[in-house]
């Protein structure tokens, strides 16, 4: 088996997944950049820009696929500076891996991961939509007690 298989798994993308106080999941662009083995931010930023263009051309509306944030870092001299980063939705991450360098094996893993996760959510939302209002309230309470969150409203 290739050494690559030991380095990355589908859990690699779960490990950098974040969930906000509303239950919305997101990934930081700079963390995704490292996993997808982009050394330079400017090169990875081009991939992000392509993904945003693709999203804007395929779905009309003002979506929060990408939210710009500033993160503090310490420079080599110990000084604190702020760098630009982005909170990325699952959809934009999916488009990023679709537009990333296909010669990288981790990109193929990312494509599979985000495709599967997106499909799982679609199935969950379809099942959720079929529930009665009482069943939806019960489902939401159960998830809250378990510490899980849902994107369904």
Image: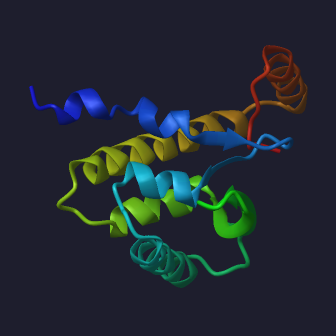
Q: Position of residue 112 (x, y in %)?
A: 33, 45
Quadrant of the image occupied by residue 20: top right
Which residue: 25% across, 27% down? Answer: 6
Residue 16 visible in the snapshot: yes
Q: Residue furthest left?
A: 1
The C terminus is located in which quarter? top right
Quadrant of the image occupied by residue 62: bottom right
**Vertical arrangement, residue 9 with respect to residue 68, above or below:** above
Residue 65 visible in the snapshot: no
Q: Is residue 106 left or right of residue 125?
A: left
Report the front residue among 36 and 147.
Answer: 36
Quadrant of the image occupied by residue 67: bottom right
How many numbered discs?
A: 0
The N terminus is located in which quarter? top left
Q: Position of residue 68 (x, y in %)?
A: 72, 70
Q: Position of residue 15 (x, y in %)?
A: 53, 33
Asked which colour scheme the image uses, the reply is rainbow
Q: Residue furthest front?
A: 77
Which residue: 36% across, 48% down? Answer: 110
**Vertical arrangement, residue 53 with respect to residue 98, above or below:** below
Which residue: 54% across, 77% down? Answer: 52
Which residue: 82% across, 17% down? Answer: 142
Q: Position of residue 55 (x, y in %)?
A: 53, 75
């Amino acid at each position: 088996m290739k050494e690559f298989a030991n380095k990355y798994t589908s859990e690699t993308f779960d490990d950098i997944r974040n969930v906000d106080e509303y239950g919305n999941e997101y990934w930081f662009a700079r963390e995704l950049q490292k996993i997808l083995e982009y050394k330079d931010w400017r090169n990875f930023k081009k991939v992000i820009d392509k993904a945003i263009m693709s999203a804007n051309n395929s779905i009309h509306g003002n979506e929060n696929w990408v939210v710009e944030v500033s993160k503090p870092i310490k420079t080599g001299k110990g000084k604190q500076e702020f760098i630009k980063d982005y909170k990325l939705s699952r959809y934009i991450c999916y488009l990023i891996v679709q537009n990333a360098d296909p010669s990288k094996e981790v990109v193929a893993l990312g494509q599979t991961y985000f495709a599967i996760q997106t499909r799982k959510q679609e199935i969950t939302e379809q099942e959720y939509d079929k529930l009665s209002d009482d069943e939806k309230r019960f489902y939401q309470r159960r998830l809250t007690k378990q510490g899980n969150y849902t994107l369904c409203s």
